[in-house]
Image: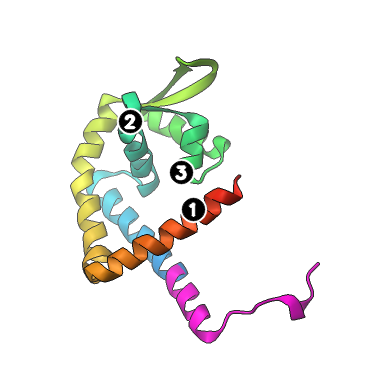
Amino acid sequence: MRYMAEVRWLSEPEMSAWRAYIVATLRLRQRLHRELAAAHDVSLTDYEVLVCLEMAPERRMRMSELATMMGSTKSRLSHQIARMEAAGLARRAPDPDDKRGVVAELTPGGEALLKEAAPTHVEGVRAHLIDLMTPEEQAVLARVFSRVDEHLEGLGG
């Protein structure tokens, strides 16, 4: 166990940056979810799955890879995909490249919902984040979070 003297406590400016990030990110995701749910009866998480599948080759992705992209567990993703299957948005199928694996596939219903909901999502992202920043701030944000992502990716699992 680490001793308290070893901890590099956050300074006031560091704490302010951290808290602003945490609170704003939570509120932003909640707002984007509410807008998608109200306009299209789809959750932000389901929308994000649809986007991942739409961007994947042949509109399908191994469940394990999708779970990693979503920051989810395979079990939680499996339940989510089951709900999306019931709604006709996605389906599971054997992996054509590895018979032991399973892929999630975008269905025509999922593709139609994504096409319908995308403008709502983009308008929300623009109104609640992008348009609040200057182009310079957007570039800084992209660099900072790319660096954080690369760092975390380097740590693995």
| 24 relative to 121 in the view: left or right | right
| 81 relative to 88 in the view: left or right | right
- In this rendering, the answer to whether 66 lies above or below 148 is above
- In this rendering, the answer to whether 57 lies above or below 120 is above
Q: How many numbered tags mark residues here?
A: 3
Q: Residue furthest bottom?
A: 12
Q: Which mark is residue 150?
A: 1
Q: Which mark is residue 135?
A: none
Looking at marks 3 and 2 on the same chain, the residue that comes earlier in the sequence is marked by 3
Q: Residue at x 49, y 73 (%)?
A: 18
- In this rendering, the answer to whether 19 lies above or below 148 is below
Q: CA distance from mark 3 to mark 2?
A: 17 Å
Of residues 9 and 118, the one nearer the viewer is 9
Q: Residue at x 46, y 76 (%)?
A: 17
In contact (CB < 8 Å): disc 3 and disc 2? no
- The location of residue 64, given as percent across then percent down, is 52, 32
- The location of residue 60, given as percent across then percent down, is 38, 26
Q: Quadrant of the N terminus?
A: bottom right
Q: Which mark is residue 70?
A: 3
Q: Is residue 94 visible?
A: yes
Tag 2: amino acid: Leu
Would you name the residue on which mark 2 appears? 89
Residue 7 on the magenta segment:
yes
- Which region shows up in magenta? 1-21
Tag 1: amino acid: Glu
Say few, some or many: other residues with alpha carbon within 10 Å of mark 2 (under 14 / 14 to 19 / 20 or more). many
Secondary element type, mark 1: helix
Residue 38 on the magenta segment:
no
| 46 relative to 17 in the view: left or right | left
Secondary element type, mark 2: loop
